[in-house]
Image (cartoon, grey):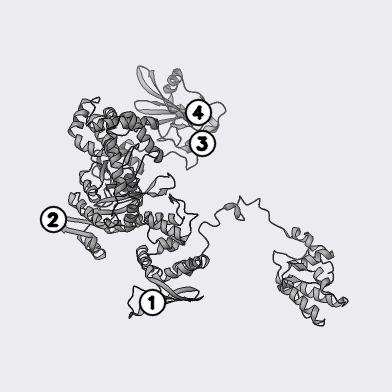
Amino acid sequence: MFTVYLKKKDWIDLLENFESRTTKVNEVSISKLEDLKKCRSLMFCLPKAKEAVPYDGYQWTGTILGKRYQPIYRKLMIDDEELNLIKCCEIKNSHFKKEILHMSDKTIVHYFLEDMGDLLVPDGSSVKKPRISYEDAEEIKKNILPLRTSSAAYAIAKEKGINVSRKQILNLQRMVKNSVTGKSGRRVVTSLENIRHLEVMDPDNLQYHINQAQELVFSYVRIYETGVKIFASACPTVGEYNDWIQYVDDLGSYSNDVKKEKLKEVLLDYPSGILFPSRLYVDSTYNLSDCYGTILLGESQHFRTKRSEKPRVYPIGFMLHSHRDSHHHEMFADRLKAFIAPFMFGKVAPAMLMDGETSLQVYADAFDSRVIRCDWHVIRLLSHKFGRKSAKTANFWLQNCYKTGNTRLERLENMVTKLEIMYGNVIESKVDPRIFNWIKCNQNWLMETATALPKLKSGMILQYTTSNPSETFNKMIKTVVQKPLPVTNLLERLDAFCSDKLHEIRKAAFQESDYVSLHQDIRGMDQMQKKTHFEKIGLECPTLLSFDPPRLLMKELNIRKTDSEEKKCEFLKILSATNDSFVLQDDSVALNEPNRVVLVACISDIFECTACNQTMPDFICRHMLKILQFLPELDRRMQLWKMEGVLRGDSGITVPIKSGRKQSDRIGTKLSSNNHIRRITEVTQMTIFDSSEEVSSDISGSISDSILPDTTNHFHTHDSTVDSNLIGINRHSTSIVLGTPEPQSLSDSTFSPLLSSTANNNISEQSISKRNRRSTRRFSPSEASSSSYVS
């Protein structure tokens, strides 16, 4: 019996008569090692093993708490023959060890427990799975995996009786070059039938045809009026923008010190370095379907993202298109220009940020805006062409300084230095000659879209400008659209996502959003001030939003219809008003029309319009909005909550979703085990059950009139003055008990915060019987009131 690693002479002695000292087995399992606890050492002789460490169910290689456990490989010379010797230690039990000697025709394995160690048998869940055999691995690599996916190969291997896991199939697949990898499922195909179905739903925003190559060419556009209004309200006026352009042009005639001082003065008023936080972002995204998606985002300084406190970015519109040809973008740009023109009168979009795709230039032309190229895309282009180090050096002369650790003054000095270069129309040659030549060849578009001067004219002083908002928005879309969808399903999903983002902005108006907040504090404003502010920042339904409506009401309403009705409220006036009815006159309707005079009456505790009937839950008609404006704030709020009840229906009246989530408030949980529960003995020992006369009067006052005996008949024979006084006192929740009740044994009764009906009847009967046995001396009103207790 050896409880240590064998030495060379021990192996020589063992090999001389190994047949009598070893047990021949085909494989070693956990059950064959059960005798190791008694014998402390076991030796097995196996056929020639293909694996270096034959499988036995234990784990001999791994890492625990940062410490690496692995076998030790040695060479052993016996009779001029070089043998491989492997020494192993079980990673979960340092006393359990084994050594393996590989010979030309057999493998000898020696297991032993050193010192006083014990054998720990692993449970079924932690037993290491066996490795796939060499023959099975070769069969899978040569005959099963070629020209098949891992899933198909796994199914065929199981049919052939090979015990293999999916992970082992994936590991073997890396060695087979002609196996099928990646996504191999059926591609999403947009058919002509899908497009015709889309044409039925919205024909005005769809264009499609079949080209000469028999390909389906289509483009669908969706524009959000809410996003357009919010963006237009955030844009600077033509005068403000022209004044800033003139200010930047004048900087060219100043020295560097004067430039620095003037820019410092601007930064005092705009510490973020952005004068016009009303920029546009446009980018195309892929892998949403078999078509492309181009999304246009806007920015507004009136709304802030709560987490970052940066101006909020929101969708203005998107286009789904089958090809990347420029005519698709031209169509979208023309639609945007026609749609946004009425709202942008006298306003200017200062900048449009995009990547290097030249076809996106048409959107800047539609908005008459300045193009700013993404710094990151320009740097990546230079890095791919000339290397990262050369691109980083060139970035100092082309972009704003984006290195971490730069102070604001250093960034401003870099800006002034680059402005001097740009105004002089000179590109510094202190960079890699290859990059210098590239810059000279592309100097025109760099000077117009990617350098410090166009950024400064767009109102950006210190910022490293990128198209991160577009990239982040695309990433958020792909978390919602997790796999390619047909174009009709994609349109539905994309429209719902964009609508939710715009609804978050509306929720910020009545302070219900968890993600967006208003830049200006409106908590001290009245209803009219709120309405004026909401109109200024471009929100739809400003009157309804100024009422602080319930969340569900604003979510379910058709905002466009309600906003259209709200604009018609200016033609309405109230002719007469009572508690439950209003008569309104609509001056926009002709005199001979029936709906010129409308009645709004309270039916079933909610106001209804006789002209429009029931418009909920679609929208709120103009007549109801006019009535809500007229009502006092408390009545208006009640009516809004009743309107929300119409949307909910009876099935929607439930406990709030997050109620009852705190486990310590529940009886029976571990966290509530220390909560105090009042016992019956504690109730019966309370002072209110004492037999004193003072306490008995407290009892009578604490019990409501519904469980006390009727005292009006008892005093009926008294004079009318006393009866009227007593009755008046009793009507004001004052109870009177004559005399002092005798002590009672209450320990056998069960009490709760409200007495049970049986206990109430017992108390009533006992009080009446005792009251009849006592003397019928008369009480004056003053004596009666002195012995009473006001509950």
Q: Kindly state the secondary structure of the residue where label 2 is placed.
A: loop
Name the residue tied to disc 3: 34
The mark nearer the N terminus, 1 or 3, is: 3
**Quarter occupied by residue 220:** bottom left
Q: Name which of mark 1 and mark 2 comes first in the sequence.
A: 2
Residue type indicated by callout 2: Asn
Q: Earlier in the sequence, mark 4 or mark 1?
A: 4
User: Which is more N-terminal, label 2 or label 4?
Assistant: 4
* Front-lying residue, 556 or 114: 556
Do tag 4 and tag 3 residues touch (Cβ < 8 Å)? no
The residue at which mark 2 appears reads as 211
Instruction: Tell me, yes or no, whether the two marked residues, 1 and 2, touch with CB atoms within 8 Å.
Output: no
Mark 3 vs mark 2, foreground winner is: 2
Amino acid carrying label 3: it is Glu
Callout 1 crowding tier (Cα within 10 Å): few <14, some 14–19, many ≥20: some
Query: Of the numbered discs in the image, which one, if any, rests on residue 611?
Result: 1
Q: Determine whether, in the image, residue 791 is placed left or right of residue 562.
A: right
Residue at mark 3 to residue at mark 2: CA–CA distance? 77 Å
Residue 145 spot, x, y in % from top left: 27, 42
The Cα–Cα distance between marks 4 and 3, rounded to whole angstroms, is 12 Å
